[in-house]
Image: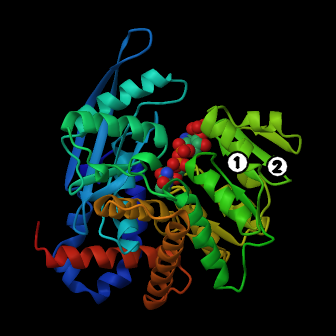
Amino acid sequence: VARNAGEPEFHQALHEVLESLGPVLAEHPEYVEAGILERLVEPERQIFFRVPWVDDSGAVRVNRGYRIQFNSALGPYKGGLRFHSSVNASIIKFLGFEQIFKNALTGQGIGGGKGGSDFDPHGKSEGEVMRFCQSFMTELHRHIGEYTDVPAGDIGVGGREIGYLFGQYRRLTNRHESGVLTGKGLGWGGAQVRTEATGYGAVFFTQEMLATRGEEIEGKTAIVSGSGNVAIYAIQKISQLGGKAITASDSSGYVVDEAGIDLDLLKQIKEVERLRISVYAERRPSARFVAGGSVWDVPGQIALPCATQNELSAEAAATLIKNGVQAVAEGANMPCVPEAVEAFQAAGVLFGPGKAANAGGVATSALEMSQNAARQHWSFADSELRLHSIMSGVHKASFEAAERYGQPGNYVLGANAAGFVRVADAMLAQGVI
Ligand code: NDP
């Protein structure tokens, strides 16, 4: 605690993992003897850097850049870049720590890392976003590479930002090294289904959880928060599977559309025009906008928090339970506060933690890396099949580990245990480093 003072999100993520590992460590004293836990909680490398840039008025601005290279026992560091005004060391460390286990759970050869900046892209011009990305990469490029560290997108970093970052990397290194970033455009090294993968994957995971109780998505109403990359494609997949997603939100409030969210309209407003969510209700007669408030007040059988950390409080969990929610899957990272998770589990609600439920994004990033290395392009259908099978594997690994360690149905324990064992075995084999 003293070494990571003032980092509440990092502490929260550590607690969540360490609390569930008791039964695993009891079976594996060799992990304790080898100091696996002490080594795991300390990042292999932390890079903080200055990002100076010039805004449209000619004023010099300075942001802080981060890249936390947490653990590379299984492969190159892998994890997104977040651009949001709230970004600090605590947030990047919690995300990087969770990423280790999530990546391990996918069964692929990827280590854990995360990065970003306190730069806020909202309201910035195209030119400002490009100059910021170029300055950010001017420092970051020294620390990343196909075999070292492969960043991707996260909050505030989508296809546009990855394009500017990749362009600057190519210019600085004189290498068209496709495998250095994932989430690239389809015309220059990107992979089919990467954009859709996290949202689709969260819904596939929900489908698997429901199936353990003989239930399915068809005919169910889903409450979704957020209106970014993860939320949009979660909404799409819910509807493709016969469910109905009736909400979307951003930091200004939420919309409810009892007719089901109109995906084309949502994409136009959020991906093309980059406007506030209230505009959706202005253009759609069946929808209403609620400023502020909690989207979790809206009744539904499925809840998919897809915005940001700690967005679903204990009170929100109580309301969802009262309204008959059956399954909750975290599309975002750590969106449910610990008390909300406990409440869902105590009430017998199926609960899929982010480490498992949103692993589809990074898993498809690893597929992008494979295609880059082999100079191949797989079809949309083939890539979606692979994503589906990876998510089934993540569900199976989490489900079975929960049973094996004595808490059937506890996906939090299952995901942490299964991910941890894979990383711990690799660390054990590679010696004290
Ligand atoms: P986007 O930037 O595309 O969208 C984020 C959405 O969440 C926006 O609607 C945004 O609204 C809202 N939001 C962000 N911060 C806040 C906040 N503090 N309060 C209220 N609303 C907020 O990000 P993504 O969809 O990519 O990421 C969403 C979550 O999913 C994050 O937790 C991310 O770590 C996680 N994730 C993403 C993956 C990916 O592949 N993209 C992979 C795995 C996890 P506004 O515009 O008003 O800020």
Image-quadrant location for residue 175: top left
267 or 373, nearer to the observer: 373
Is residue 243 visible in this depiction of the protein?
Answer: yes
Kindly identify which residue carries mark 2.
Answer: 257
Q: How many marks?
A: 2
Distance between mark 1 and mark 2 Cα atoms? 9 Å
The image shows residue 245, relative to residue 401, as above or below, that is: above
Side of 211 where 124 appears, left or right: left
Residue depicted at 28% across the width and 45% down the height: 67
First of labels 1, 2 by sequence position: 1
Q: Which quadrant, please, contains the C terminus? A: bottom left
Residue closest to the eye, 316 or 190:
190
Cβ of mark 1 under 8 A from ligand 1: yes
Measured from the top left, where is residue 198 in percent x and y?
53, 59
Q: Is residue 76 left or right of residue 197?
A: left
Q: Secondary structure at mark 2?
A: strand
Q: Is residue 185 visible?
A: no
| Mark 2 nearby-residue class (10 Å; few <14, some 14–19, many ≥20) | many
Query: Is the CB atom of the residue marked by disc 2 within 8 angstroms of ligand 1's nearest atom?
Result: no
Q: What amino acid type should be assigned to the residue bearing mark 1?
A: Ala
**Numbered label attached to residue 248:** 1
Residue 134 falls in image quadrant: top left
Q: Position of residue 38 (x, y in %)?
A: 21, 66
For this orientation, the residue located farthest to the right is 285
Give the quarter of the figure containing the N terminus. bottom left
- Image coordinates of residue 40 in percent, x first then y, are 25, 65
Residue type for callout 2 = Asp
